[in-house]
Amino acid sequence: AMLRPGRFDHLLSVSLPDEAGRVDILRAATRKTPIAADCDLAAVAADPRCEGFSGADLASLVREASMVALRASLTNDVNVQRRLVAARARGGDQSLASQVAESMVVGGDKGEQDAPEEAHIEVRYEHFDDAFGRVFRSVSAKDIAGYERVRARLKGAGTSATQIELDVDTLRDGLRKQQPQPGAAPAPPPPPPNDE
């Protein structure tokens, strides 16, 4: 039914990204994410576990790696707080308590504390490595084979899915014509069918 004439005027075939495409997608997906200087996105894209990832899968991988980095930072903060409480409870280990207190105090004698400062969290390769255990490709080999069969069928019907150019302006103009114009009278209902 999808291949009937007039059903789709334009078809656009977009394959899964290769390694270079994955690097570009990872760069775009991490544009607003702080990445450690030693984290090589090309190495992430070249990882065999990344093979077959779509753009959405790569974006999900970046989000999950960011969450892993955030969890690690929060766990570290909680561990520091626990050590501080334990040191104060023991009373003997004042060095840790004083080190933590000194890092929080501004002006020494004044005893004022800094306003809570944003933690600087960077995503490292190890966070991506952990994220690979939670994020998997969404397009299976069976799905890819099905898409290839449809592409071959379209080529056999005289339509080249890889050579069709999508004319966005024509599509946009067609959609505008279908939408009612503001202030325009509603279109009259179609005439009733003639039973004769």
Image: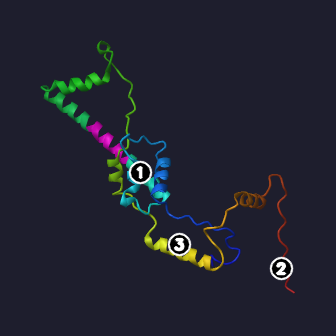
Magenta residues span 67-78
Callout 2: few (<14), some (14-19), or many (20+) C-alpha neighbours within 10 Å?
few
Q: Give the mark nearest the N terminus, 1 or 2.
A: 1
Q: Give the mark nearest the N terminus, 1 or 3.
A: 1
Q: What residue type is labelled 2?
A: Pro
Say whether residue 158 is magenta: no
Q: Give the mark nearest the N terminus, 3 or 2.
A: 3
Image quarter of the C terminus? bottom right
**Side of 100 relative to 64 (left or right):** left
Secondary element at tag 2: loop
Q: Can you identify the residue that label 3 sits on?
A: 147
Q: Can you identify the residue that label 1 sits on?
A: 42
Numbered badge on residue 193: 2
Callout 3: few (<14), some (14-19), or many (20+) C-alpha neighbours within 10 Å?
some
Residue 189's place in the image compared with 122, above or below, is below
Measuring from the top left, give residue 33's x and y in whole percent: 44, 42
- The answer for how far apart the CA atoms under marks 1 and 3 are is 28 Å
Q: Predominant secondary structure in magenta?
A: helix
- The answer for how far apart the CA atoms under marks 1 and 2 are is 64 Å
**Side of 180 relative to 1 (left or right):** right
- The answer for how far apart the CA atoms under marks 3 and 2 are is 41 Å
Secondary element at tag 1: helix
